[in-house]
Structures are given as C-alpha cells and as structure tokens.
Amino acid sequence: MAVFEIASFGAIVVLVVLGLGIIASMMGIFNFAQGEFVLLGAYVTYIVHSAGAPVWLGMIAAPFVVGALGFVLERLIVRRFYAAPIVAMLGTYALGLIIREIVRGLIGGLYLSVPEPVGGSVAIGGMHFSTWRLVIIVITALVMAGSYLLLARTAFGLRIRASLENPALARASGISTNAIYGATFAFGAALAGLAGALIVPVFTLFADLGIRFLIQGFVAVMVGGIGSFAGPVAGAGLIGTLSAALPWVISPVIADVAVFVLAIIFIKFRPQGLVAGKGV
Amino acid sequence: MLEIAALVIGLLLPLVLQDYLTVYATRVLILCLFALSFDLVWGYAGIMSFGQAVFFGSAGYGVALLARDLGITSILLVLPAGLLIGFAFALLLGGFLLLGRHPASVIFVALGTLTGSYACDRLARGWYYLGGQNGIPSIPPMTIGSYELTEGPAYYYMAIGFLIVVYLLCRFLMRSQFGLALAGLRENEQRIAFFGYKVQHLKAIIFSLSGAIAGLAGSLYAFHEGFVWPNMLGVVISTQVVLYVLFGGSGTLIGAVIGTVVIEAVSFWLSNSYQDIWPIILGVLLLLVILFRPAGLVSLLLTERERVGNFGRSPGKR
C-alpha cells in the first residue's frame, strides 16, 4: 500500500517536472511561471466541468489551451529573455504572478474540488488501489515514453536537440531556432497543463497550487542535471519518491524540509546532477 | 539631489500624517531597510538571493523569543541580537552556497536561497516552540531604559534614524574600493578574479553583511508589528523584496528606497478600492519594467553617471 502511495506521488512529481525540465534543458531557462501553467491546467478542467461537460473533456482540453497560451507568451515576452537567465527568472516570475492573481480573482480564494473522471478502486491481490491514481501512473509512463520518442526518434526532436547543442550552426543549416524555441516552450507548457488537469481531483484547486510544485520541480531538475532528457526525469523520480516515502519514517514537517536540504547539499557537491552531459 | 529630497520628505512626513498613516509609513521605512539589504547583494554584487526573508524572519523570530522567554526588550540588546542572528544565518547559508571547490552558478545560488526560504517557512509552521502556523503573538514593546517604544512618531523617527545610518554606511562602502570590486564582480566576474581578488570571499562577505542589515530590519519589524509569523521567513516576502528593488532600480541605493515606497504607497492607496486587481497590476508593471526599463524607475530620474554600472547589455548597444 505504501509503495503504491509513493509511486503515485512520484508519478505526479515526474509529470509536473517533465515540462519544466524540457524547458530548462532545451532552452536554458528556468520558467518560474511553470507552476502557474499547472494551475491553469487545473483551472481549465474545473471550468469545463462546471460548464456541465464531462471532466475528461476538460482534461483533454487543458494541455492544448495551456500550450497555446505558452506559445503566445513565448512569442510576445519570453523570447526576449534568452540572453540572460536571471532576467528570465524574474520575467517569468512576473508572468506567473499575473496568471496566479487573475486565477485567484476568478475563483475568489476558494478551495474548489473536481471529481475524478474514473472513480472507485481496483482490487489487486486483496488490496484496493484508487483507480484514478493508477490512471495517473499509466498516463505519466505514456507521456514520458512519448516525450522521449519525440525528442530522440523524430526529425522534430532532432531539430530541437540541434538548436540546443549549437544554435548558430542550427540556424546556418536552415532550422528556424525561433520557431523551435516557441514550439518547445509551448510543449513544456502543455505538459504542465496536462499535469494540472490530472492532479486536480487529487489535490483541490486553489490559487497557490502551483508554488509548491514549482520549488519541488526546480530542485528535481537541478538534482537530475540540466541538459538531458533523462536527468530531470531521474531527479523528479528521486525527489518524488523521497518526498512521499520519508513521511512514513519521520514526521512530515521534518521530512518535507529534509528532502530540500538533502537535495541542495547533493547539488552543491555534484553540480552536474545525476545525469551529466547533454543529449537525450 | 534625489537623496536629499527623499530625506527631507521622510523627516517631515509624521508632522502632516494622521497617526495610523504614520504607523504605515514606519512599516514602509523598515521595509526600505530590508530592500537595501537585497540591493547590496543583487544590485551591487550580482548575487541573486531569493531567500532574503530567511535573515529578516529569523532575526524577527530570534528577538521575539528573547522578549517572550527571557523578557529581554532593551534596545541595546535586541537590535544587536537581531543584527547578529541575520549575520550568522547569512554567513551559514552564504558560506555553504558560495564557498567551496566548485564555484557556484548564479542559478544554483538563486534556487538554493529560494529553497532555503521555503524550508525555513515550513519548519517554522511545523515547530510548536515557534508557535506553529500562528507565529508568536503579542511581543512586548521595545524599551529604552524604562521608556516603552510603541508604534507612532517615536518609532518612526527611530526607524528613519537607522535607515539613514545604514544608508550612509552602504553608500560609503559602495563608493570604496570594496564597492568597486563588487560592481566589477557583477559586470565581469572572471576579470575581477584575474585582478587577484578572492571572488568567492568577496561574495560571502557582502552576503553576510546584507544578512546583518536584513536582520536589523527584521528585528525592528517584529517589535513594530508586535508579532511574528511564518510568512516572514517565506517565499512571499523573499520575492516581495526582489520586486521592490527591481522596480525602483537595482544597483542604486536610492532606487531600492524609491521602489519600496512607491510600491507600498500605491498598494495602500489601491488596496481599499481595487484590492483584487492590485497584484495583477503589480505583475504587469513589473513585467513592463523588466522588459523596457531594466534599470528601474530611478533611471527616469537619475543620470547614467550616478550609477556605477548598468545591467546586462551596456547602454546603446543591443
């Protein structure tokens, strides 16, 4: 039972971090608005649900809506920040602030709940597992495999990696790095939107939903190592598992803090992260 | 010029303000002090600290505990204590993040301080001795001899006194050789290293110094408000101070002060009628400043010559 809890929480963290990690690795930007993209995904799901449509429809719509918004924001604002990583942090922080406060205004500081599209539980070997959490684990695995294949096996993925490795040469080879960056950012945002949509039945919807995941995500990306696909995923798996597993051993508050402290110490002595090197 | 104008306005303000506004103005002054501490690390030395509230809040909690458990409220003891607590925490965190064999990347320091702030917030929330979610309420007022210093004009003048002293010290420091080395660090770290400066030591020194100033601000804040709560350590205050300085103009001392005063004043003015949309407006304004006025509001008033250096790209070159 504990293992299932840990796995399902680990899956949630991986899902949230995947988009963040792709943006950080492929573009060198730490997107402070990522938590708010998660929030928006959750909000879209809520809107669709409260309009009377089935919840799963909202969950399908969320990544597209958030991805589209991500694309627009990248075109208008974020692309100006590529030269300076710190300015990018602050700029995306401002974006996140705007999104968060707008959503707060719309939902009015309430805690709203969205039902699970697939309720009930599945009995395996005499133990009951929440169906929805199983679905999350499965979807996370699918999304991870899909993203990996997209980056490693398709021509589009090759272009993304080329733009990461050597932007000048990529441009000289006729790849529009601008368009690639836009698409990558939109893809990362869409993943965050999907994550938000999937987790909203587990957590409730409230304006500060994203902040917690944001810091967790950053730490996971740093632990895993920037520049590769495997790095952030490994980091997210580790951080997610630790944050879910430690509270079973020591008191939750200490566990929460301990994960972060351990992670920072780890990064201090191994700045390149778990998975060093670039590529997929 | 700007500095003298600000000083005159600051000194005359309590004479024209109603009492409750003086209390609000005192809070703003203390936040100005806090903003100065962040300006030193980011504006001058180019170290991004997203955890400035750790020093602010830990000093606040420290003096609150002194007052609650030991009954120590004398100004001669609590303010130096706050200063020391902030200094010690900054030395620990900064020493850990900045020193060592691997030179720390900017991103690592930013995320490390942010995480530190988040962790302290969580810890304070869960620690019964520190009052948990509610913090420590009803701290007794600060005392000078037998005189009790409560909020009002007296506290206002004390706060402005500290602000002036710290401001002048910072100003002196930043125009010294040390300050120039720091500005050089921000502009081109490698070159400063080649000049023979110990870059990491310089960074750790200014980080601890700024922690001490944040600690002073935190202890003043704790006694002024009369209570401390976990938010004082957390990410919200940490980012708030970043907003003040960016908005006003990082890399100038007066910019930090102006940013704090403008944001707090507008926020006070708007909070009655437009409470919900004010954070949105703040976000939009901040974004505009970052995009179009990277030098902050103060660049509308000050000439380039008065600023030690510019950020990112040099002026005129794109």
Image (cartoon, grey):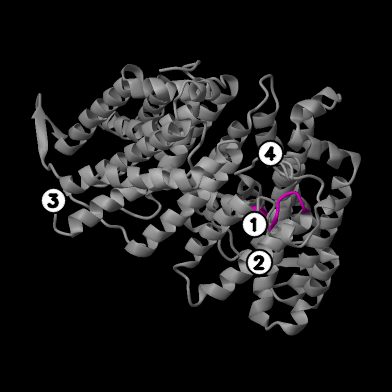
Amino acid at dot 4: Ile
- To the question of a shared chain for discs 4 and 1, the answer is yes
- To the question of a shared chain for discs 2 and 1, the answer is yes
Q: Is residue B34 left or right of residue B80?
A: left
Q: Do the residues labelled 2 and 1 touch (CB within 8 Å)?
A: yes
Disc 3: which residue: A54
Quarter placement of the C terminus of chain A: top left
Disc 1: which residue: B247
Disc 2: which residue: B262
Structural crowding at the residue carrying mark 2, measured as other residues with C-alpha within 10 Å and reported as few (<14), some (14–19) or many (≥20):
some
State the separation of the CA atoms marked 4 and 2.
24 Å
Amino acid at dot 1: Phe
Q: Regarding mark 4 in the picture, which secondary structure is present there?
A: loop
Structural crowding at the residue carrying mark 3, measured as other residues with C-alpha within 10 Å and reported as few (<14), some (14–19) or many (≥20):
some
State the separation of the CA atoms marked 3 and 4.
49 Å
Disc 4: which residue: B47
Taking the spot 64% from the left edge, 72% from the top edge, the residue there is: B24
Q: Which of marks 3 and 4 is in front?
A: 3
